Image (spheres, rainbow, N blue to C red):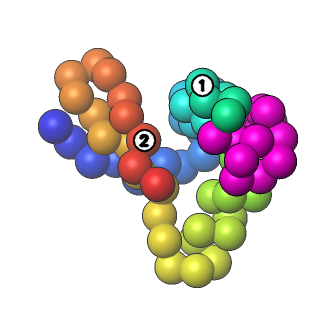
Amino acid sequence: MNLKRNTGSPEEIKLALEIYNSNSDFLIHHIGKSSVDESFIRNELVGMEEHGFTSNLIMDGEQYHFQF
């Protein structure tokens, strides 16, 4: 497994959207929405960086997993 920093590329944003939007009950409970869009993910990435955090991709062969 390799760790790669999430740069916010279109492919990485798409993967993050798939993960976030895979559990609408969680989203409704935590942010009051059943889904998020690209601007939400981009804002999350900016906010994380401003607070000294990073979003990373865990690469297992050709599969990606997010670490927030």
Instruction: Find residue 66 and name its label.
Output: 2
**x then y, percent, for residue 26:** 63, 40
Q: Amino acid at mark 2?
A: Phe
**Residue under the image location 29 percent in, 19 percent down:** 62
Q: Is residue 10 visible?
A: no
**x then y, percent, for residue 33:** 83, 41
Callout 2 secondary element? strand
Q: Badge 1 local density, few (<14 within 10 Å), some, or many (20+)?
A: few
Is 55 within the magenta? no
**Residue under the image location 60 percent in, 25 percent down:** 22
Q: CA distance from mark 2 to mark 1?
A: 13 Å
Vertical position of residue 41 compared to residue 14: above or below: below
Furthest residue to the bottom? 51
**Highlighted range, magenta:** 26-39
Q: Amino acid at mark 1?
A: Ser
**x then y, percent, for residue 10:** 65, 32
Instruction: Find residue 54 and name its label.
Output: none
**x then y, percent, for residue 65:** 37, 34
Look at the image and tell me in which quarter the N terminus lies: top left
**Residue under the image location 27 percent in, 47 percent down:** 3
**Residue 29 falls left or right of residue 37:** left
Labels 2 and 1: the sequence-earlier one? 1
Marks 2 and 1: which is nearer the front? 1
Q: Nearer the viewer, residue 28 or 7?
A: 28
Instruction: Find residue 22 and name its label.
Output: 1
Residue 28 occupies which quadrant of the picture? top right
Furthest residue to the left? 1
Vertical position of residue 3 compared to residue 17: above or below: below
**Residue 5 falls left or right of residue 58:** right
Vertical position of residue 53 compared to residue 37: above or below: below
